[in-house]
Amino acid sequence: MTPEHVRDAAGLAAVFGFFAMAWFGWAQEGPPRPWVKFLAAGSILSILVAAAGGFLLWRHWSDGTVFGDATGRSFGIIVGIEFAAAGLGAALLAWRGRADAISAWIAFVVGVHLFPVAVVLEIPAVHIPAALITVAAIGAVPLANAKGLKTSAVIGPLAGTVLLATAAMSLVDALTR
């Protein structure tokens, strides 16, 4: 369930920690006031996990990795499709006057793109955050509307928490080998 190589576990901790911080930050666009301190704490914890993962990644850079020419190419194609879908969808939502739904759209694209990433990187456990983020993204707009919240205040903490938990588990995995 975990990456075969320490370098890949550390890289997962660094990348997911960084993006967890970004999601907690996006959630601060307009959350209920009592949430701000928790969102800030999530951002700080996320960047600490990302930094620790980045340090371990650097320390294990010369170790084995699943990344090779074919893996790198496949990964690049997946990420390219993700960026294109996210950008086009965000532009369409903005054009249609639905900018409030952009954060949910981006989260949906992120969640969906993690499914093939899990396969390419040979990390089956990544299917779990993929599913959780995808489901959270689908429910974010209706939940935000029902509670009178900004969509980013709903999806940001959900995606941030899933990514932070995954990053922390990857960091622990990398540290305990």
Image (spheres, grey):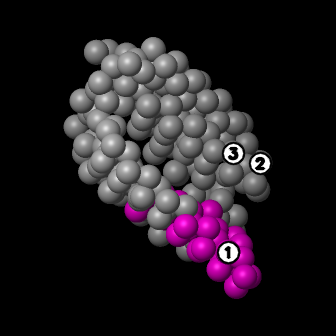
Q: Is residue 103 magenta?
A: yes
Relative to 123, 141 lies left or right:
right
Relative to 33, 52 lies left or right:
left
Tell me whether circle 1 and circle 3 mark residues in contact (CB < 8 Å). Answer: no
**Distance Cα–Cα, label 2 vs label 3:** 14 Å
**Distance Cα–Cα, label 1 vs label 3:** 21 Å
10 Å crowding of disc 3: few (<14), some (14-19), many (20+): many
Which residue sits furthest bottom? 96
Amino acid beneath label 3: Gly
Q: Give me the residue at 61% from left, 67% from top.
A: 87
The residue that disc 1 covers is 91
- Position in image of residue 113 (x %, y %): 41, 59
Residue 136 shows in the view: no
Q: Give me the residue at 36% from left, 31% from top.
A: 8
Range drawn in magenta: 84-112
- Position in image of residue 123 (x %, y %): 27, 41
